[in-house]
Structure formats: structure tokens, C-alpha cells
Image (tube, rainbow, N blue to C red):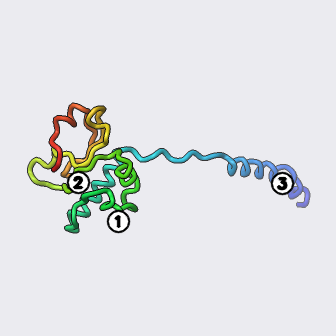
Amino acid sequence: MKVAMSFFQLRVLPVLLVVFASACTRETKPPPPPSAEEGMKELAGIYRYIEYSKLPLPRKPEDFSDYVDSMPSAFERIKQGDYVVAWGAGRSTASGAAEQILVYEKKAPTEGGAVLLRDGTVKQMTAAEFNAAPKAK
């Protein structure tokens, strides 16, 4: 029995230590940032909550500050100007709302990009589709 312990202690244990040590020292890459669509989905949820709760509609970026935990990606993009918001407009299921753009990526008019429609739909639009679509007011 003592011989088996010596073999384990001398051969296997050092190998295990090297394996575990190398696994602990590997650099892990940070996860990629959320896509523009993910940020729009965060906003869709916030607008749904605002509508359901009958809260005032956002009129400036700071109006979203109470919802930062629910929309970390979207809030940063709004503050940085990467998302353009139709301030004072909200979610709607009225006729024609499914075509009205509520929030869009800053690059959408020239390059296309992600948009949030007033009915809560998130989708990609080309620049031509974006420019032809009605904007929420």
C-alpha cells in the first residue's frame, strides 16, 4: 500500500498540479459586446413595461436611468449617441404602428441597421428601407 501512495505522490500528483496551474493562468477573453439587436430588444421590454405601467414616456436619455439594470447595453448606446430615439413617442399597437420606427441605430439612414418599431418588433433594415419607413413622432 505504501508503494502505491508513493507512486501517486511522485508521478500523478505533480502532473495534476501542472494541469490545474496551466488552466488557472490562461487568459480568458471577455465576451463579445451585445449586438445592436440585443440592445433594441432590451428597449422593447422597457417600452412594454412603460406602456403596461402607464408611466410617462422618455423625453431624454436620463429618463431611462431607472431602467439601467434591465437595459445595460441599450442605455450606454443611447448615452453615446449610437441609438437615435423618438423622444416622447412610445409603444403602440394602433394601425400603422408596426411600420413606425421608434429607435434606430445612428448608422441606419446611410448604412442600414437595427431598428425598434412602435409595436415592439426589432429588425434589420437596409438604408433604403429605413429611409422609406415612417418615423414615430
Q: Quadrant of residue 114?
A: top left
**Residue at the image point whose x is 42% and y is 47% from the top:** 34
Circle 3 or circle 2, nearest the eye: 2
Disc sitting over residue 66 in the figure: 1
Front in this rendered view, residue 15 or 62: 62
Going from the N terminus, do you reach mark 1 or mark 2 first? 1
**Residue at the image point whose x is 81% and y is 53% from the top:** 13
Q: CA distance from mark 3 to mark 1?
A: 58 Å
Q: Is residue 124 left or right of residue 98?
A: right
Front in this rendered view, residue 30 or 89: 89
Q: Amino acid at mark 1?
A: Asp
Q: Amino acid at mark 2?
A: Trp
Disc sitting over residue 78 in the figure: none
Circle 3 or circle 1, nearest the eye: 1
- Judged from the image, the secondary structure of the residue bearing numbered disc 1 is helix
**Residue at the image point whose x is 30% and y is 32% from the top:** 111
Going from the N terminus, do you reach mark 3 or mark 1 first? 3
Q: Quadrant of the N terminus?
A: bottom right
Q: Amino acid at mark 3?
A: Phe
Q: CA distance from mark 1 to mark 2?
A: 16 Å
The residue that mark 3 highlights is 8
Say few, some or many: other residues with alpha carbon within 10 Å of mark 1 (under 14 / 14 to 19 / 20 or more): few
Q: Is residue 63 left or right of residue 136?
A: right
